[in-house]
Amino acid sequence: MSKQYGFIGFGLIGGSIARAMKELTDKPVIKAFQHTPVPSHSLTLALSDGILDAVTTDLTEFADCDMIFLCAPVQKNIEYLTQLKKIISPTGIITDVGSVKGNIHNEICRLGLEAQFIGGHPMTGSEKTGYENSNVLLLENAYYILTPTEKVSEKALENYRTLVTELGSIPIVLNPAEHDRITAAISHVPHIIAAQLVNLIQHAGPLEPKMKQLAAGGFKDITRIASSSPEIWESICLSNKESICDMLTAYQDSLEDAKQMILSDKKEELFHMFDIAGNYRDAIPAKAKGMLVTPYELFADIKDETGAIATLATMLSVQGISIKNIGIIHNREFEQGVLHIEFYDEQAKMKSKQVLENHGYHIYVRE
């Protein structure tokens, strides 16, 4: 008998999980909950795509689901738990995909649902949102964090771990507090830093127009994630206050240390600061996806002449490769590659690298 999965919220992450599920040998039955009588455009599209088998406005139809995925915003997910407690089967499992775990685990404990909950967090994403932008490969090689309660069965946890592996992701088990502290450090605080660094330039006074004009290379790399959804990040910040504020305090202390090194002309300490940071950063694995969206980009040396970009773009087009963004870098903060080319996925990026190198272009990949 086919597994049955229910989804509450069906955007980028929920849609991508469902797409990957439909690639499995034993294709499951997938239902989605719609809180209004008329299905949204996204759910209608998912039905026509064959990704969804049914859409319902009645949560009791999730009673026979083996697993229910909460894919709405963090606070909305928590609000559904009271209703789900009334209808979930004794063997059913509730999970979520939120990037904060402490608050939902607290509510699970309050409601006495610990035997039926395993928190989930696929550490992947895109700058685009909604089911329309979901992708079967979004989960490929992404870390997928599982945060089981103390009362959930080992069998249920192992089944979930197996499912994550079958979807192409890498399962890692953490407790909720570990998860929230880790994500605060590697995702939540970096988003805050990026946003405030952009705001620092934006409010720089008379020099702001020139700063904006000259901002490129390193500045755009470090602030890319400042373009993320403000609604999502407002919710995350308020849901993970303690861990985020602890990490922000530690970061502020590290900045003060750097400031004092500069003021005191401590050359060796400054060198050491950059040296150990560079070595540690280079040791971070590059293959698996993480929480921060990675741009699929190449850099190429080309002559500054009429038609140069068009010629290159045509070569890629002939090979069926779609370009997301392309443009000349006017402020070359690094010496490699004057043309920046961005793609929609890793496969297109690597195929383009091969095609362009075969045509004699010098290609650079920044790690």
Image (cartoon, helix red, strand yellow):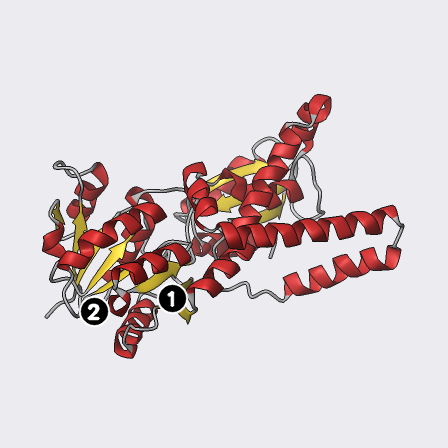
**Circle on res. 147:** 1
Q: Position of residue 72 (x, y in %)?
A: 30, 47
Label 1 neighbour load within 10 Å: few <14, some 14-19, many 20+? many
Residue for point 41% across, 58% down:
102
Label 1, secondary structure: give it: strand
Question: Image height check: is 217 above or below 99?
Answer: above
Q: Quadrant of the C terminus?
A: bottom right
Residue for point 52% across, 36% down:
310
Residue 84 figure quarter: bottom left
Q: Is residue 103 left or right of residue 288?
A: left
Q: Position of residue 66 (x, y in %)?
A: 18, 65
Q: Is residue 216 left or right of residue 355?
A: right
Residue for point 43% across, 56% down:
347
Q: Residue furthest right?
A: 265
Q: Is residue 63 left or right of residue 14?
A: left
Q: Is residue 261 left or right of residue 226?
A: right
Q: Foreground: 9 or 94? A: 94
Q: Foreground: 58 or 242? A: 242
Which residue carries the number 2 mark? 25
